[in-house]
Amino acid sequence: MVRLADPSYRDRLRESVAQTRRNPLWEPIQIILSDHMAGRSGTRERPGDPGLRDFILLITILVVFLESAARTITPLRPALTMTFEQGITPSNSGAAPSTARNNRLSH
């Protein structure tokens, strides 16, 4: 059985978990996770793999950051557009080209 608390995994995740523990989201998410685990098992005991809780928290905080970053990104507006009909042309004022027109093949 693979356990996240095994030295090979624990050592690779040590620095990432240490950085994540310093994040202000760690404590509130840890409380939520503990409450969730208590609801499932009827107790606040840690799961059998001590590294599992840290890994769940690390991944949860990583997803929060990825979702936050994704919300701040605006779509790329290419300077050039390439279509089968017109070849390579400057984009119309930075607007994305119409995909229906671009997907047609000229015969």
Image: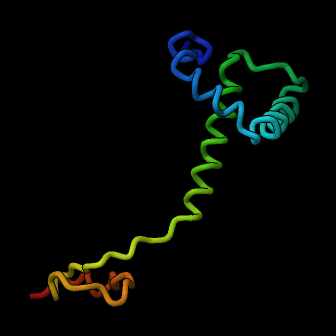
Horizontal and vertical percent for residue 31? 84, 35
Q: Quadrant of residue 22?
A: top right
Residue pictured at 25% horizontal, 79% vertical:
80
In the rendered view, tell whether residue 106 sits above or below residue 53. Answer: below
Furthest-left residue in this view: 107
Horizontal and vertical percent for residue 94? 37, 83
**Residue 94 as seen in the image, left or right of residue 14:** left
Residue pictured at 37% horizontal, 81% vertical:
96
Quadrant of the rendering where the C terminus is positioned: bottom left
Q: Quadrant of residue 88?
A: bottom left
**Residue 61 as seen in the image, left or right of residue 70:** right
- In the foreground, 93 or 97: 93
Horizontal and vertical percent for residue 64? 65, 49
Furthest-right residue in this view: 42
| Count of numbered tags | 0
**Residue 88 as seen in the image, left or right of residue 35:** left
The structure's colour scheme is rainbow
- In the foreground, 24 or 84: 24
Residue pictured at 45% horizontal, 71% vertical:
75
In the rendered view, tell whether residue 2 sits above or below residue 69. Answer: above
**Residue 23 as seen in the image, left or right of residue 13:** right
Furthest-top residue in this view: 7
Residue pictured at 32% horizontal, 85% vertical:
100
Quadrant of the rendering where the N terminus is positioned: top right
Q: Quadrant of residue 37?
A: top right
